[in-house]
Amino acid sequence: MSTASTSVPSSPARGAGAPLLEVDDLRVQFRTGSGLVNAVNGVSYTVSEGETVAILGESGSGKSVSAQAIMGILDSPPAEVTSGRIVFEGRDLLTLPEEEQRRVRGPGISMIFQDALSSLNPVYSVGFQIGEMFRAHRGTSRKEAKQHAVELMERVRIPAAKERVNDYPHQFSGGMRQRVMIAMALALDPRILIADEPTTALDVTVQAQVMDLLKDLQRDTGMGLILITHDLGVVNEVADNVAVMYAGRIVERGTVDEVFGNPAHPYTDGLMRSIPQVEVKGGRLQPIGGQPPNLAAIPSGCPFHPRCPKRRTGAEAAPGRDCVADVPPLRLVLPGREAACHYSEEVLDA
Amino acid sequence: MGRYIARRLLLTIPVMLGASFLIFALVYALPGDPIRALGGDRPLAPAVVAQLTDEFNLNDPLWLQYVKYVGDLLQGDFGTDFRGREVLDTITQRMPVTIKLALVAIAFEIVIGIVAGVMAGIRKNGFFDNVVLVSTTLIVSIPILVLAFVAQFTLGLQLGLFPIAGVNDGWYSYLLPGLVLAAGSLAYVARLTRTSIAENMRADYVRTARAKGLPRRDVIVRHTLRNSLIPVVTFVGADIGTLMGGAIVTETVFNLPGIGRAVFDAVRAQEGAVVVGIVTLLVFVFIFFNLVVDVLYAVLDPRIRYE
Amino acid sequence: MSEPNLTTVGHDEAGAGGVTGATDQPGGGRQNSLWSDAWRQLRRNAFFWIGALFGLLFVAMALLPSVFARGVDPRSCSLSNSNGTPSAEHWFGFDQQGCDYLANVVYGARNSLIIGLLAVVVILVFGVLVGAISGFYGGVTDSILSRIADIFYALPLILGALVVLRSGILGRGVVAVAIALAMFGWMTAMRLVRSQVIAVKSSDYVAAARAMGASDSRILLRHILPNAVAPVLVYATITIGVLIAAEATLTFLGVGLQAPAISWGLQIDTGQDLLRTAPHAVLFPSLVLTLTVMAFVLMGDALRDALDPKQRS
């Protein structure tokens, strides 16, 4: 695959050389009672040290599933990774034995989730749950692990960490709970952190604090950050590069500034028009028409075609570029820019 | 917590008084005359009848009889039966048998019920899950009376594995009645565990535990089982009280000289003092274990806090 | 530009929780769809049909015993046949008195059915009434009624019924046994209804009805009780089975039905002494009793699965 996502440096901690993580043609299926659901259909991207890659998409676009596939925590059955490679530090995680994969989770790649309340076990203290990382991966004693937990809680700026280390998740506020999640995920200095909608469940002011914290921690550690979100504002503020997903595919990719400034895919274009922008006062917001795709029956050709205002079919279409019949490949449309649309050039011009 | 327990204990008093008065009224308000019945075919001398009637306060109005009874009870006096035997002696003599029976039953419930439930819940809709589903339905449907005879006939008489009556073989004699007594609850525990495990396996925090790279054993034992067993433990705790009171049929069929058998015999003989004494005790045990369970619940689940 | 009217539905996040696929139910009356959904669910449940089959068989046996007894009179006996084993002519063999056992077992169904139904009706009427009053009025009324329920709850069903029947205040016979069982069995129905009433009482649509000036009794009957029907129905179905088993137990213990009456409990009681020599005497009434209880348990279980949307996967 192309290395478009590594082409625009913006973080000082960025190392040169090979990317930390390389996802190549990842495909995930769910076998359900009502048939096969194609949740991820050939996703590729890379993440380098210090880089923040945002995976942007609406519910059901496959962004969370692809992240869980990287972590190796999909429920199987019903989920099944049908093809692809996930190369981390030179090894394909998908071919590793389960025990080796497990050793990567935590020290290598770590993950935080959207709802910290349900993602933390209600019957153990937060100190215990953070300390578990040290006990499971380093065989640290219980007492020492708790000591580490306090330090981590201080690092994510939880006030009175020493007093609160024995408290239970339900005794914390939403923002503090998410900090606990972050402390836990960062316990073993992972090289990659996957943050799945880390601020969606939080109040707006708390959202900003948590994102700031993540950015600061990234600067300190130089870890790669995969930010999964549907929040364009968060992407704009935090990410270096963005990959836009639709129906289990990446439909556009590039630096955040370029993609947001001049979308190359009608879907991205639609997303941009659906949010209020400070620069364009008085303009009308335009929602994207139609409904998100049914992953059990993804539309033929370009999966976005039923909702696409620019779609061409039949006589209007160029040969081999019929939106209803031909699947558009993800291709280079500008230097450092990729999009999966037969008519990207027209979108860019608009 | 202390205040909660104190309040709960206070609330048990009216329930215990109510239950024992209900039984007291039913036993003593009967039209038949237990004193006269005591003589059987040979009528007692009127003086003896009068003396006994007086001794048991049978001339007082019902409520006064009850007040006097409770007054004695508070001083640890359970009274005597018509033959002059201390009711408390009967209880202390019979109690160990029922306690042993209940312990064996609880052990079966915990071991078989939880193991079957865990195995079924981990692989929901798998082969073992269906086996558990069908067998628990079957067990729930068999009346304990029938189950007792099936066990006696097959495991006892046909295969000769277990004694079918009495307590002459120590703990061994309790195995078969214990299994029979436990059967219904055992099936319920299996189902409860299964549902709870299957539900928790999909919980977000179990996904987190896997994302943390914890060994599979820790994910299952620490993050799935621990949470899943909270409702199971509370059920089993409350069931101790229920089993003690539910042992009438089992103790009768297997001829075990326990509390259940004693109360059954006392009901048939219209031994009011014995019936009321034992029932009061059973009600206390039932309420006590329910209280224990409530406290236990708060210990096991930190989200529960009693004001 | 055209926006095709897609028929696709359901776009749940295909996350770790599993994919639900495209199974959105069309909207509609909540109660209506609950029952029609439930029926659709029930029809596909094999356990339900097994339960219904045995249940029907049992009811038919109670209504038309002579057909199932193959025309044999259960009371025409000959001691020469005492404890005879099953044969092609007499499927269940004979009892100690030499009566045809099939006829006796078949004729036992009627008493079981009457007691089971009668007791469950009393339980429902009493439980619903007390539960509705307790939940609806709350406060002191609720405290007192709930405490009374606690009192009865602390007494085991068999033990309570045993004491009542032995005391003789109800007399003996079918009605007495049914009432004794109901006396110590109404609390669960009461608690079910009470909790439903409390849950629905605070809902917006009840507040709306109240604002429109609906009376207490109207709110209770039209808005609150219909919500309690589903759980009570499930409970009642299983309870019929439990009550039938309890009747057999009480009769076995010697305080239920008495000798001239035909009852499975009496047959098991008589048969227990013959366990070594004539095991069929215990076997057949036990088997039929178990199948009967199982019928109601299976139907109740299936109903619960069908009526509880949370259980659907």
Image: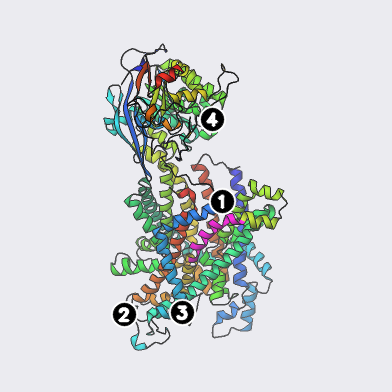
Marks 3, 1: nearer the viewer:
1
Mark 3 / mark 2, whichever is N-terminal: 2
**Label 3, label 1: how far apart the Cα atoms are:** 48 Å
| Residue C129 in picture, x, y percent from top left | 63, 61
Q: Nearer the viewer, residue B168 or C265?
A: C265
Q: Please check the rendered image and state whether residue C37 is part of the magenta-colored stretch, yes or no.
A: no
**Whether marks 3 and 1 lie on the same chain:** yes
Residue shown at 45% from the left, 73% from the top: C60
Which label was assigned to residue C85?
Answer: 2
| Residue C5 in picture, x, y percent from top left | 48, 38
Name the chain letter of the residue that bears numbered label 3.
C
Amino acid on which disc 3 is placed: Ile
| Residue C95 in picture, x, y percent from top left | 37, 81
Label 1: which secondary element: loop
Residue shown at 44% from the left, 24% from the top: A266
By secondary structure, the bulk of the magenta-drawn segment is best described as helix
Q: Nearer the viewer, residue B195 or B271?
A: B195
Mark 1 / mark 2, whichever is N-terminal: 1
Q: Residues within 10 Å of mark 4 (few under 14, many from 20)?
A: some
